[in-house]
Image (spheres, grey):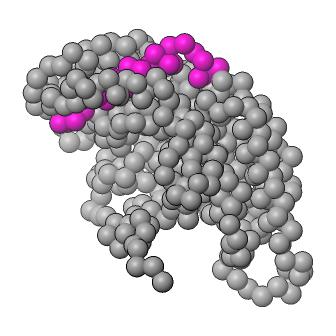
Amino acid sequence: MSDVVTPVELENTYGAHNYHPLDVVVSHGEGAWVWDEDGHRYLDFLSAYSALNFGHRHPDLVAAAHAQLDRLTLTSRAFHHDLLGPFCAELGALTGKGMVLPMNSGAEAVETALKVARRWGHEVKGVADGQASIVVMDDNFHGRTISIVSFSGDHVAKAHYGPYTPGFRSVPYGDAVALEDAIDETTVAVLVEPVQGEAGVILPPADYLPEVRRICVQHDVLMIADEVQSGLGRAGATFACDLEGVVPDVYVLGKALGGGIVPLSAVAADADVLGVLTPGSHGSTFGGNPIACAVGRAVIRLLETGEPQRRAADLESTLRDGLLPLLGSGLLEVRVRGLWAGIDLDPALGTGRDLCEALAERGVLAKDTHGSTARLSPPLTIETADLELGLEKVRDAIREMNDQRPSTPDHLAPPTDRPASALDRKSR
C-alpha cells in the first residue's frame, strides 16, 4: 500500500472545505480541453464560470503575461506605471464609458460599485448620509462578501454570517412593476444581472432591461449592470445588455477580463459617477497591477475584433439544437443565450450534481447549481465539432439516467430523500 499523499488528500486535510469539487484532478489544459493526472482528456464545459472565455492558455494572452513578467509585476497604486493609463483608456473605449477603476475579483468590483453608488447618492443626488438604499433582485449572485451575502437569497451562502449590511431591497427578477414600487427618495441604484448566471442562466423577460433603464432614468437612479459572467462575449455580444439595446450607468466586469490568467475586474462609468471617488476614499494594492493590465489589454484586443462575440452568437443555435431534443425526455427546461445554457433536469432522474458526475465519466466537465439545474459554458474558442461532441455526451448521460430510472410505480416506490445517482457504480 502506497504512503504517497495525493494532492486531493492534502487539499481535503489542509484546505478549508468551502467547495465540493467533482472527482477530477486537472493538471494541464489547452483551448477547450483539459487533462487529469492520469492523462484522461476532458472537454471544459464550464470555462471557470466564464473566466476562461478564450480557453486555456490562449497564445495571445499567455504571450502578454510572459512578456510582462520579464518587465514589471507590481508597483501598487502609490506610483504610476506605464500600462494602467492605456488599459483604462482601452476598456473605457470598449464600454463607452469615460472612467475605469480596475480591481481584482468580481466581488470586489461589485463592492466598489455599491460604494460608488452610495457616495454618488449622497454627494450628487442629495440622499442623507447613511440613508442610501439599493434595489437588488431575488436569486441574485454578485459574490460572497458580507455586504453581498446580506442581500442574497441563497441560504447556504448567507447563513450564520450576520449581522448583515442594511440598505438593500430585493424584488423579483423580471418584474419591472415591483422594481419601480421599491424605489423611493433614498434609492441610489438598481443592481441587476442582465442574465442571472448562478441562478441557472435565467434570461430576462422581453423588454425587462429596457424597462429597468427607463425606470432608473425617470427616478434619477443609477443602473448597475453586473456583467461579470455575462459580459465580454459570453452572451453573443460584448455585453449582454447590448442584446437589449440598453446602456447602463455602470458596468461591473471581471472573470474573462483577466483571460483566465490573472484576477482582474473593473468598474466602468462616466466621470459624473466614478468622479465622486477621491484619493484615499477607495483603493486596492493589486488593483490595476502591471501584469493584470497587460493581460487585460490583450483581452480587449481580442474583443475589439468582434470574433469572440460572433462565435458565441453563431454557436448559440448549435448549443440550443443539441439540447432541445431532450425536453420531455429528461430535461424540463432549456435556456440558452450565446454560448451559455442552463438546463433543468427532471428531479426524478437525479440532481444536477448527478448529471455533472455522469458527464465527467464521459469526459465533459460542467457544474450544477440549485438542485437539478446544470450550467454549460464552453470556451468561446471551442471548435464546432468539439461542441457537438460535448452535446452528444450530454444526451448520452441523460439517456443512461433515464435507463436507470426505477420502473416501480410512484405510489409503490419507497420514500427517498433524492434519486440515487446513476454514478454510484463509478467505473472510469
Q: Over which residues does the magenta segment extend?
A: 283-310
Question: At 26% from the left edge and 17% from the top edge, which residue is drawn?
Answer: 83
Please say whether residue 308 is one of the residues in the magenta stretch.
yes
Q: Is residue 3 left or right of residue 231?
A: left
User: Which of 199/403 is in front?
Assistant: 403
Residue 172 to residue 258: above or below: below
Residue 200: % across, % down = 61, 49
Residue 84 to residue 264: above or below: above
User: Which of 266/415 is in front?
Assistant: 266
Q: Taking the image as drawn, is residue 86 in sight?
A: yes
Residue 194: % across, % down = 54, 34
Q: Taking the image as drawn, is residue 199 in sight?
A: no
Q: Residue 90 appears in which quarter of the rendering?
A: top left
Question: At 40% from the left edge and 11% from the top edge, which residue is drawn?
Answer: 93
User: Which of 148/283 is in front?
Assistant: 283
Check the picture and name the quadrant holding the C terminus.
bottom right
Which residue in the rendered view is the most extreme toward the front? 1
Q: Residue 63 appears in which quarter of the rendering?
A: top left
Question: At 79% from the left edge and 66% from the top edge, which residue is drawn?
Answer: 401
Which secondary structure is most common in the magenta stretch? helix
Residue 291: % across, % down = 29, 28
Q: Residue 95 appears in which quarter of the rendering?
A: top left
Q: Is residue 199 left or right of residue 318?
A: left
Please say whether residue 293 is one of the residues in the magenta stretch.
yes
User: Which of 72/286 is in front?
Assistant: 72
Q: How many marks?
A: 0
Question: At 35% from the left edge and 28% from the top edge, which residue is drawn?
Answer: 65
Residue 264: % across, % down = 35, 34
